[in-house]
Image: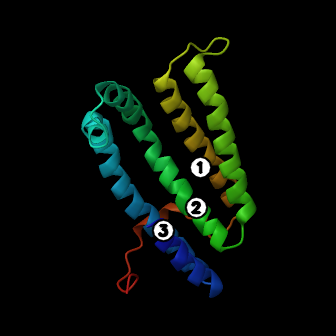
């Protein structure tokens, strides 16, 4: 979905069709949000089953289930970040995408250390801390992307109305 969204926005960018960039961005986010809701729900409700598909080690399943249940809340901001990052790259705004990825990765690394092992007033949380760090980092990464997209009023700066556009032939 992310790649298809980027391809369609790239075509619209080449044709200087800003309105189609906005429609395509909103449509991509709607589609991804639908899939994310499904996978987030399954990951939250049945983490042991999902981890069990890859291993039979009960300790790995128990630990992985704790992580997956919490980290599932990062799926939506991460997916939306992917869409915006890919779109920004197709429109040659690579620095914004790179900066957001750098901030997200850097923050995740630092917060992992703080939350897994504890730091100052933060108690050690182990695998729960790693999951929480990931959620925070993904939200911050998305906020960095959105900050620059809307600050510069880039073509992918969608408004609420773009989520409700339902034109026949848009997918044709």
Q: Are marks 2 and 1 in contact (CB under 8 Å)?
A: yes
Which callout, 2 or 3, points at the residue further toward the start of the chain?
Answer: 2
Residue 8 in percent (x, y) is at 51, 79
Q: Is residue 72 left or right of residue 41?
A: right
Which callout, 2 or 1, points at the residue further toward the start of the chain?
Answer: 2
The residue drawn where x is 24% and y is 38% is 49
Which callout, 1 or 3, points at the residue further toward the start of the chain?
Answer: 1
Q: Which mark is residue 17?
A: none
Question: Is any part of residue 20 visible from this angle?
Answer: yes
The residue drawn where x is 64% and y is 11% is 121
Q: Is residue 95 above or below residue 14?
A: above
Q: Which mark is residue 84?
A: 2
Residue 13 in percent (x, y) is at 63, 80
Mark 3 sits on what residue? 162
Q: Is residue 85 above or below residue 73?
A: below
* Mark whose residue sits in front, 1 or 3: 1
**Badge 2 local density, few (<14 within 10 Å), some, or many (20+)?**
many
Q: Nearer the viewer, residue 59 or 20?
A: 59
Element class at badge 3: helix
Q: CA distance from mark 2 to mark 1?
A: 9 Å
**Badge 1 local density, few (<14 within 10 Å), some, or many (20+)?**
many
Residue 123 in percent (x, y) is at 56, 12
Mark 1 sits on what residue? 142
Q: Nearer the viewer, residue 45 or 48?
A: 48
Q: Is residue 140 above or below residue 48?
A: below
Q: CA distance from mark 2 to mark 3?
A: 15 Å
Q: Nearer the viewer, residue 163 or 114?
A: 114
**Badge 3 local density, few (<14 within 10 Å), some, or many (20+)?**
some
Q: Quadrant of residue 57?
A: top left
């Amino acid at each position: 979905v992310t790649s298809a969204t980027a391809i369609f926005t790239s075509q619209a960018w080449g044709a200087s069709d800003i309105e189609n960039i906005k429609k395509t961005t909103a449509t991509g986010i709607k589609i991804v949000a639908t899939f994310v809701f499904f996978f987030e729900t399954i990951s939250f409700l049945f983490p042991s089953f999902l981890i069990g598909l890859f291993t039979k080690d009960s300790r790995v399943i128990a630990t992985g289930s704790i992580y997956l249940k919490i980290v599932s809340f990062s799926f939506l901001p991460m997916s939306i970040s992917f869409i915006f990052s890919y779109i920004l790259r197709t429109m040659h705004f690579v620095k914004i995408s790179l900066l957001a990825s750098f901030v997200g990765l850097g923050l995740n690394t630092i917060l992992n250390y703080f939350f897994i092992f504890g730091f100052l007033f933060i108690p050690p949380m182990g695998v729960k801390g790693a999951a929480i760090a990931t959620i925070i980092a993904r939200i911050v990464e998305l906020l960095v992307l959105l900050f620059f997209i809307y600050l510069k009023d880039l073509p992918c700066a969608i408004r609420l109305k773009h989520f409700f556009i339902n034109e026949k032939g848009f997918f044709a």
